[in-house]
Image: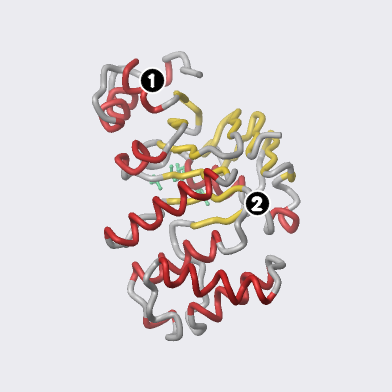
Amino acid sequence: MAAIETDGLTKRYGSVAAVEGLDLTVERGTVYGFLGPNGAGKTTTMRLLTGLTRPSEGTATVAGVDVRERDRLGEHIGYVPDTPPLYEKLTAREQLSAVADVRGLDRETVRERVPALLDRFGLDAADDRIETYSKGMKQKTSVVQAIVHEPDVVFLDEPTSGLDPNAARTLKAVLTELRDAGTAVFLSTHVLPVVDELADVVGLLYDGELLAEDDPERLKADLDGETLEDAFVELTTEDDPATRPRERP
Ligand SMILES: Nc1ncnc2c1ncn2[C@@H]1O[C@H](COP(=O)(O)OP(=O)(O)OP(=O)(O)O)[C@@H](O)[C@H]1O
């Protein structure tokens, strides 16, 4: 069973198709770099896959659970959205303990994992209220919140946003460890060196459709690009990308 499987997944807002006929397969133990220009539909796809918005058409399963069954998804997934979903009046430690409880972690595991992750990300102010945090401190809390229950699939939307280089490096190491332990890491970012470093597979979304999908090295070689940025620019600006055949592994 694949970690993520979609079939004709579509989301329309009025006459706008934010995501159109998306067929995606992401295997366990994979970092999937999900790229695309502004407005391509990346966030909408992640909201569909995390059960936050319902498909207009098509189907999707994440860790074998239909995304329409939002209540059952929670224990299997983690999500770092573009805006950290935190209760400002709580401290990070309170927030993380509450979330771990909801996700069904036992007290002892919470007592072990929460301090270890806070320490790893250098979140020293874990006993201060979140409303006093900087952007990066909130982002660290959001990342820890998404992985504390060791989910089967973790979705990250611009996760390095606001993180200092030390925290960004920690995040990359943590994502690699999760991948090696069998988690599927679905990573959307415009910071292409991060994708170049981590991704096993890259998918390029354009106007709601998957325009290309490949191993990053092959994608670069096929497009005569030295970097993923070269490949991205080539795919999204040369002639009309919508008329090109999709590249598949
Ligand atoms: N709630 C909404 N109502 C109406 N249109 C929406 C809504 N959410 C997204 N859209 C539209 O769907 C399209 C895809 O948006 P989305 O936010 O998924 O893109 P994105 O790839 O995440 O972009 P970015 O890289 O800028 O974050 C855009 O045309 C956007 O205007």
Kindly indicate the quadrant of the structure image that contains residue 103. Answer: bottom right
| Spatial separation of the CA atoms under disc 1 and disc 2 | 32 Å
Give residue 203's position: percent from left, percent from top: 46, 31
**Amino acid type indicated by mark 2:** Gly
**Count of number-bearing discs:** 2
Q: Residue at x 53, y 49 (%)?
A: 178
Left or right of 100? Residue 89 is left
Left or right of 184? Residue 72 is right
- Which secondary structure, mark 2? loop
Residue that carries the numbered disc 2 in the rendered image: 51
Give residue 38's position: percent from left, percent from top: 37, 42
Nearest to N terminus: mark 1 or mark 2: 2
Kindly indicate the quadrant of the structure image that contains residue 17. Answer: top right
Residue 218 - label: 1
- In this view, the residue in front, 130 or 197, is 197
* Dot 1 alpha-carbon crowd within 10 angstroms: few under 14, some 14 to 19, many 20 or more: some
Q: Residue at x 30, y 26 (%)?
A: 231
**Front: mark 1 or 2:** 1
Give residue 123's position: percent from left, percent from top: 39, 74
Q: The N terminus lies in which quarter of the figure? A: top right
- In this view, the residue in front, 101 or 37, is 101
- In this view, the residue in front, 172 or 84, is 172
Residue 234 - label: none
**Amino acid type indicated by mark 1:** Arg
Give residue 3's position: percent from left, percent from top: 64, 39
Q: Residue at x 55, y 59 (%)?
A: 147
140 relative to 178, above or below: below
Q: Residue at x 28, y 20 (%)?
A: 238
